[in-house]
Image (tube, rainbow, N blue to C red):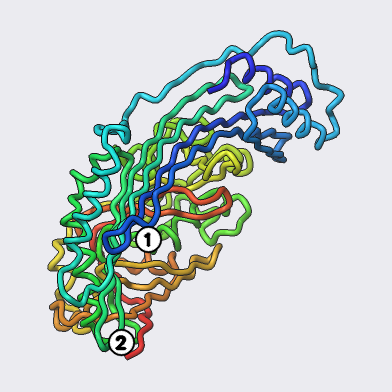
Amino acid sequence: MLSETLVSDVLRRARLGGADFAELYVERWKRRNLRMLSGEVKEATSGLEYGAGLRLFYGTEVVYAYTNDLSPESLLEVTETLVKLKGQAGQVDSRGEGGLDFRKQAARGLHAPEVPLSARDRRYRVERLLEAEAAARVAPEVKQVQTQLLEWDQEVLVATSEGKWVEDRRVRTRYVVTAIAQNETGMQTGTFGPGLSVGLELFDRYPPSEIGRKAGEQAMTNLRAKPAPAGTMPVVIGNAFGGVIFHEALGHLLETTSVAKKASVLSDKLGEKVASDCVTYIDDGTTPHGWGSSEFDDEGMETARTVLIENGVLKSYMVDKMGAMKTGYAPTGSGRRQDYTYAPTSRMRNTFIAPGDTPIEKLFEGIEYGLYAKDMGGGQVKPGSGEYNFGVKEAYIIRNGRIEEPVRGAMLVGKGPDSIAKIVAVSSDLETSPGMCGSLSGSIPTEVGQPHLLISEIVVGGQA
């Protein structure tokens, strides 16, 4: 994307201007969005982003700037502007003599698509979304269906004053089906949205007829459901997107973004028991074709599989370059950013609770009265403490060990570190689900997951 000479000149100018370390991040990002409502195309857009961000370290102080003008004049002007912020512009060597000896690494294509985005036309895409819509109309009460297809093709270059030169290409595809059911009692929705680091083979992995049907059936289940009860009770949480609770209420507490500032209740607890024995919690940037996977992070480090909690014991945090400098922990390839307009921070990639050995039916045995939170929705979390409240998209009453009538409007309320300590059994049916996670370095694709699991007690908010 940029010549080696230009990149070298920018980084040398930064170092000669007094920076201890300089990093240049460059990206070219193509995006497409196709949205349909009840069989009609409502939005069909595409765009190209192209820009660079320059980050300079002065000890543990950082200055950052970005530009979408990648001409040599612009990039060098950005460099000198940053150097001036530290009052050392006069030290910049404008002759540009010599150059950096880059150690180049290119992505091996571990997550490369089987069906490139360019291999199919718009008609193919429209037909797949129409197929999903037709399947979502499982009953006359399904009055409206929205389908949406998102496609990303991102090329990234990270180069540093230490001689690192890393290139990565990230292709991601996701489609979402939302069904709206309505009768005299009101209106309810059902939503499913698979996504992976793949091309258009996503439609083969997750057939539109299957995803559409699931969305329609969930909408109809919620339409028939009665208001959820309230109280403290045992809760079985479903797999896949069930992992969003621990992503939000636990995962963020293990990022050095909060750990380094002592803003997390889990700071300085390495080696301590923080969860029940049946819990192993992992953040894995190497998951083949995972929604949050890449071969390198946005600081140019190879991604890795990081065991955060093993059999209840805290083993590691998620560490970026700045987090490593402030805490002394080794980097874990967790530096991520939304795009070139953001500096990277430590972030999750594909985070999940590892499979256990309890059969699913055993999770329900012995529960006289409880809640089965089959599919989770969104919620809110208090940073630092992990206090949360999350809505449940699809829920059922558990009565005498059996899954009984559906209920709607359930809310789970708790505290991440407390809830993970109350997990008493974990099944083996691990599944993951895509989502977007917002934090200091913007909104990024992350994957959450878990098997079915039983929490001995959670506060359930409901209207009944």
Q: Tell which of 456 and 68 is nearer to you.
A: 68
Q: Residue at x 65, y 33 (%)?
A: 54
Mark 2: few/some/many CA within 10 Å (<14, 14-19, 20+): some
Q: Residue at x 72, y 23 (%)?
A: 73
Q: Position of residue 219 (x, y in %)?
A: 24, 72
Q: In screen coordinates, is 17 left or right of 264?
A: right
Q: Badges 2 and 1: C-beta atoms under 8 Å apart?
A: no
Task: Label 1: state its secondary structure.
Answer: helix
Query: Which mark sits nearer the N-terminus, 2 or 1?
Result: 2
Q: Position of residue 69 (x, y in %)?
A: 64, 31
Quadrant of res 230: bottom left
Q: Amino acid at mark 2?
A: Pro
Quadrant of res 183: bottom left
Considering every residue shown, the one lying at the far top of the view is 98
Q: In screen coordinates, is 34 left or right of 62?
A: left
Residue under label 2, please give it. 229
